[in-house]
Image (cartoon, rainbow, N blue to C red):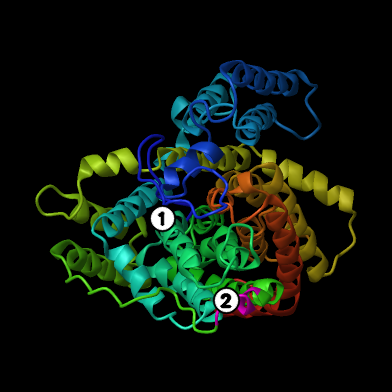
Amino acid sequence: MSGTGGGERGGHRGASRGRGEQPRRSVGGAWLGQALVLGGPGSRGSVARSLVLLGLALGLCLLIVLLPQPNGLSLPAQRAFAGATFILVLWITRAIPVPASVLLLGLLLRGLGAVPSLGAGFGGFASPVVAFLLGIFGIAHAVVSTGLARRFSRLLLRRARGGVVRLYVQQLFLFCGGAYVVPSAITRSSIMIPVYRDVLRRLRSGSGGEPGSRLGRLVMLPHAVLNAAASSALLTGGLASITAASLLGGVSWLRWFAAMALPYYLFIAAAGGLLLMCFGGASGDAAPAAGVADGPEPRRAPWSRGEAQALVTLTAVSLLWVTDFLHGFHPAFPALLAAAALLAPRLGVAEWRDFLRQVSWSQLFLVAGSLTLARVLVETGAAAWLAARLFSSLGAGSYPVWAMALVILLLSALVHAIVPNVPGSLAVLIPVLTPLAARLGLPPLVAGFIMTMAVDTLVFYPYQSVLALMVYETGYVRTIDLALSGMLFMVLLMALVLLLFLPFWGLVLERWGAA
């Protein structure tokens, strides 16, 4: 998932900088990246800048309200477009913190008459998706605070002794396997990046492990995209999967896994192979006998009660998620139950007060605001009206499925480049493009899957995602590296969608009886 992060202050520092490393901010705490990307006090310029951008957002909103009402567009729908413009400007410019922008959105929607009540203006907060995300945050906090996550990471890293290529391949497996233990990609990366920085410094490779080297880029670039993709293969893993499943009508855990796990894992394998081809020469810089760590292996610490309790709880909640077709519980129910058990006073394994300080309230508000926006666009008819306008502009002729898939993929990449957060991008894309895709012959679920993967895996600059910023701040990856890898991954995703994913999703929908 996009993360469990922490507050805007506090947190531990990452490993000490290596020689020649640029003095960028620490990546030890996910909350730092979230504060910069999702907005925070003083994170993006002065108070004057924030006021100017807030005035710009309100001005554009007022302009849309005053424009003549287009044919076929209801007054609430026009006001919904005004509210959407307001919040998107704030999210794109990061003028004010996300929680403040979401609160303003709810008040604005009610004040403009886009929604019938104040409760509808904050309707996203009533979604079980928000409760589910809160439960996931609680589970992840307990897994990290007990040491279970670090034990799991170091266990797999020990198996990578023997060379750089083996280390790299092990890292990809760690992404996929770690998502079952620690669903949040940000939490995993905040644990793993300092470990890999230490590994790079300890490799006997001359300058091969220095910031900016081919070896450093080979090891660090996958954290920017592939780690998040591993989380999104599971419904309980990423913000992309959680938000998309809700906007697509509530896809169950097992159905999401059946439809998306294989495509995500194939993308991770193919993208990982491309990075290895681009930077694989770095492995030649290292001494053949270089391993993950030098010296004798440290004695393994015995399992603590907290680790054992966290592992048992995580196993139990995973079984409830997998068997949701039997009991019918929404994934939020087991998540909240597990979080309550792990955070309960005296009985739990983590402190409730620590959890409250470190939970990413920005991401909770972001998801709630995105769901509110999407719901208002659909219920007022704004999304259907825009889809009809797009359909009429394309003409009445039929289009090949592959062409529609490519158009949706490219539009998704463009929107996410403009709106640098996953839930916000999906809240704009899914309500508008899924009905358009259905009218042009592409199943809405397939269109939603394409949008989710495009938004989730195509990153072109550091501030487009928290993980990309965390990687950029290590000094091992440059902006040009993210841009080039983003373009390379876009070509790869287009090829995979056309050649493999479209036929696969067709078979899945046929089996579901929803084709």
Estimate the x, y position of residue 44 in percent, counting from the top left.
58, 29
- Residue 347 counted in the magenta span: no
User: Residue furthest toward the front?
Assistant: 206
Residue 317 position by quadrant? bottom left
Part of the protein shown in magenta: 282-287
In front of the other: 176 or 112: 176
> On the picture, is 33 further left or further right than 158?
right
Query: Mark 2 highlights which residue?
Result: 286
Q: Is residue 409 left or right of residue 17?
A: right
Give the mark count. 2
| Callout 1 touching callout 2 (CB < 8 Å) | no
Q: Is residue 285 magenta?
A: yes
Which secondary structure, mark 2?
A: loop
User: As drawn, which residue projects farthest toward the left?
Assistant: 346
- Residue 187's label in the rendered image is 1
Say whether residue 116 is visible: no
Question: How far apart in space, not on screen, are marks 1 and 2 (Cα)?
Answer: 29 Å
Residue type, numbered disc 2: Ala
Please indicate whether residue 202 sits to the left or right of residue 282 in the image: left
